[in-house]
Amino acid sequence: MQQSIAIMCGGGPAPGINTVISTVAKVFLKSGYRVIGLHGGYKSLFSENPEMIDFDFTFADDIQKQGGSALQMSRYKPKDSEFTTKFFVRNNVKLLVTIGGDDTASTANRISKFLAENNVSIQNLHVPKTIDNDLPLPEGSPTFGYYSAKDEGVRIAQTIYEDARTSGNWFVVSAMGREAGHLAFGIGAACHFPMIVIPEMFNKVEVTFDRITRLIISSMVKRRLLGIRYGVAIVSEGVFHFMTDKEIESSGVNFTYDDHGHPELGNVSKAHIYNMLLQHRLREIKLDIKSRPVELGYELRCVKPTAFDLMYCGLLGYGVKQLFDQGVTGAMVTSDPAGHCAPLYLSDVADEKGKVKPRLVDMEGEKVKMIFDHGIQYITADDYEAAKKYLPNPAHYDFRNILGWE
């Protein structure tokens, strides 16, 4: 029977998935392998009738530059009891290529161990994907999709800034980012937004809605002192992941709850929460400033990849074949800025519980310090006297006081 490889995607989409799929498919077809694409992720893989397609070169070539994913994605995480060898034996699979985050990669490793215990030998290689840029790849290597998502985010954010200037209002933007603030920081810095709020800023104090609200008001008042009556603040959704359930519930939002009793954040607009709390505080201190919420999320995930990701994802796809030929298994494929592909084993980047440690924004990095010291606008001690016109206690809205950076 012809030897085959199987490709599947887990988690949410990111620009460049199709470029990876296309490259992997073409390079293995060229080497005489059958290339199987699985719809529905792991749920389909272990079903009685997996939903799959056979790639030919024409189809693989057609999807290369498209956004979204030609293979339907799923967040399904199978239990060990669901594992079976049927799909792999029936199709003579020699390599399982997974495209996704750390959960998708960890599950692939579990499957590989199960197959080895049942005398089915296959390799598994993982291509790390997320627009959050929070996987611990080698220095200088982004996660694929990040730059394309940021580019689209900047395009939308610049339009929002123009609306703020034109209408004389403020906008509060929320940007995706599960635990890290890379996307919000990248968009906000590129657009010269007067306030950027990311979870990594709270390295001295707890993340609270009160502090987030005061940071935004600090920028609003500083802009007033500069004679500017409009602006945009961008807040990473990642701040929620560092809040307690009690703090989240204090927002007053009527949340639904998951099976573990935690608020289901995916069902609400983070921008609306930030903006609602901001408007309440502005009324309390009698500061007449209008603001509107904008969510930057799903709009960014399925855009066409930019030139950077088209090249980068192609290199990752070729890297899959290179590492496969070297006999590598149980590893993520990485490509450094020079184009050198290398394996990154999960055991080297996971904690004692097997969870991959996220790559956070480096608050000591020169780029980050430059933006927070000089790029954004906020109240400092030099502004206290002038700010009394708008605030009863300006020191309470001092950027560095709020964050405990003094």
Image (spheres, rainbow, N blue to C red):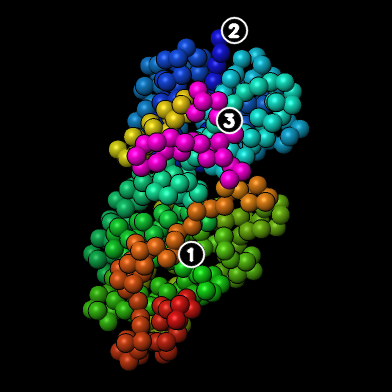
For the magenta stretch, what is the residue range? 323-348
What amino acid is at disc 2? Met
Q: CA distance from mark 1 to mark 2?
A: 53 Å
Q: Which mark is residue 348?
A: none
Q: Quadrant of residue 278?
A: bottom left
Q: CA distance from mark 2 to mark 3?
A: 23 Å
| C-beta proximity under 8 Å, tags 1 and 2 | no
Residue 229 falls left or right of residue 286: left
Q: Which mark is residue 329?
A: 3
Q: Residues within 10 Å of mark 2 (few under 14, many from 20)?
A: few
Residue at 45 percent across and 59 percent down: it is: 361
| Residue 42, x across and y down, in percent | 62, 31
Residue 262 visible to the viewer:
yes
Q: Residues within 10 Å of mark 1 (few under 14, many from 20)?
A: many
Which residue corresponds to mark 1? 200
Residue 140, above or below 283: above
Residue at 32 percent across and 48 percent down: it is: 151
Q: Is residue 335 magenta?
A: yes
- Between disc 3 and disc 1, the foreground one is 3
Image quadrant holding the C terminus, namely bottom left
Residue 245, above or below 284: above
Q: Which of these two is toward me, 167 or 180?
A: 180
- Badge 3 or badge 1: first in the primary sequence: 1
What amino acid is at disc 1? Glu
Q: Which mark is residue 1?
A: 2
Residue at 71 percent across and 29 percent down: it is: 114
| C-beta proximity under 8 Å, tags 2 and 3 | no
- Between disc 2 and disc 3, the foreground one is 3
| Residue 182, x across and y down, in percent | 42, 55
What amino acid is at disc 3? Thr
